[in-house]
Image (cartoon, rainbow, N blue to C red):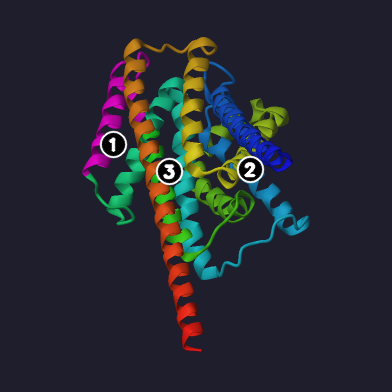
Amino acid sequence: MGKGSALSDGVVKNIILSYTYVAVWIFLSFTVIVYNKYILDKKLYNWPFPISLTMIHMAFCSSLAFAAVRLFKLVEPAALSRRVYLTSVVPIGALYSLSLWLSNSAYIYLSVSFIQMLKALMPVAVYSIGILLKKDSFNNSTMSNMVAISLGVAIAAYGEAMYDSWGVFLQLGAVVFEATRLVMIQILLTSKGINLNPITSLYYVAPSCLIFLAIPWLCVEFPILKKQSLGFHFDFLIFGTNSLCAFALNLAVFLLVGKTSALTMNVAGVVKDWLLIAFSWSVIKDTVTPLNLFGYGLAFLGVGYYNHSKLQALKAKEAQKKSTMADEEGRKLMHEREGDAEA
């Protein structure tokens, strides 16, 4: 009785912890998105410099990651050679910088709700790029699912009241670069047995990301900021808390994926998107049309089915792995018995 009760308590504790990780990640992701929108939107804080904002995030994250790894020794650095760093980490840093730059830029032109609808295309981009780079195989059923998601997003875009072609181009570009980064992480790092947690990821990736961002910043935003420097005072409270939220979000990703699974994060992401759409409509007063909701609802069903398919595939893989281990144990036991019989 006591043992069963202890087991039940342990299960309940794990469920509570899992929901806590999900809630923390949703809250921080929600906060960073709305905060970035507030800073960049010309009708709100009116500081439309997405490259500069992203560079502030990267400088802040790099500094904290360096302190955690080198000064306080909280995390052990990964054993990366210079060749591995240049051929594996630097390309990921370049893709990450492009993804963040374009994604933050889109907040100047598009509503928060519509951006979340466009982000529903992420599974489509990851799957398509995975096929192109031969990391995934073509499947008619999966591709039909991807077409359904794309159709839903297209309907949502058609029904968007504040549609801006340049903003859509920026956000779709961000989706493509982010999807490429996720696939390249599997190819360049995971396949080589290199696993980085968020602290070591920021320690290695953020500095290269900062350098890559400096190139367009010098050409695009620095000349404008130079002219405005006399009338601009750096707001440490706004940019400091914004950067702290961005850093905390990276830690939350580690907790969520490490303690639950990447699939849980995908499902939590869908919940977060609906919350952001509701917040954008009710608080920011962005226009959300019935056609928006119908299109995103269709895309949502497609993403939900995709996550369900991934879950079933993982279960099948795990079952096959257990079956293989059981067969090996059986053969080993049979050999031992044959050896005993011969003796």
Of the residues under marks 1 and 3, which one precedes in the sequence?
1
Instruction: List x then y, in percent, for residue 175.
Output: 39, 38
The CA distance from mark 2 to mark 1 is 30 Å
Tag 1: residue type?
Met
Callout 1 crowding tier (Cα within 10 Å): few <14, some 14–19, many ≥20: many
Residue 151 position in % (x across, y down):
26, 27
Choose top left, top right, bottom left or bottom right for residue 146.
top left
Q: Main secondary structure of the magenta part?
A: helix
Q: Viewer-proximal residue, 268 or 221? A: 268
Residue that sits furthest to the left in the current view? 140
Q: Can the viewer see residue 229 in this picture?
A: yes
Number of numbered discs: 3
Q: Nearer the viewer, residue 311 or 151?
A: 311
User: Which quadrant would the N terminus be assigned to in this image?
Assistant: top right
Residue at 78%, 55% (x, y): give it. Answer: 72
Q: Circle 1 is placed at which residue position?
A: 146
Please report the residue visible at 64 percent of the width from the left and 32 percent of the height from the top.
Answer: 242
Residue to which mark 2 is pinned: 251
Instruction: Report the Cα–Cα distance between label 3 and label 2.
Output: 19 Å
**Which element type, helix, strand or loop, lies under badge 1?**
helix
Residue at image mark 3 = 178
Q: Look at the image and say whether residue 301 sits in the magenta stretch.
A: no
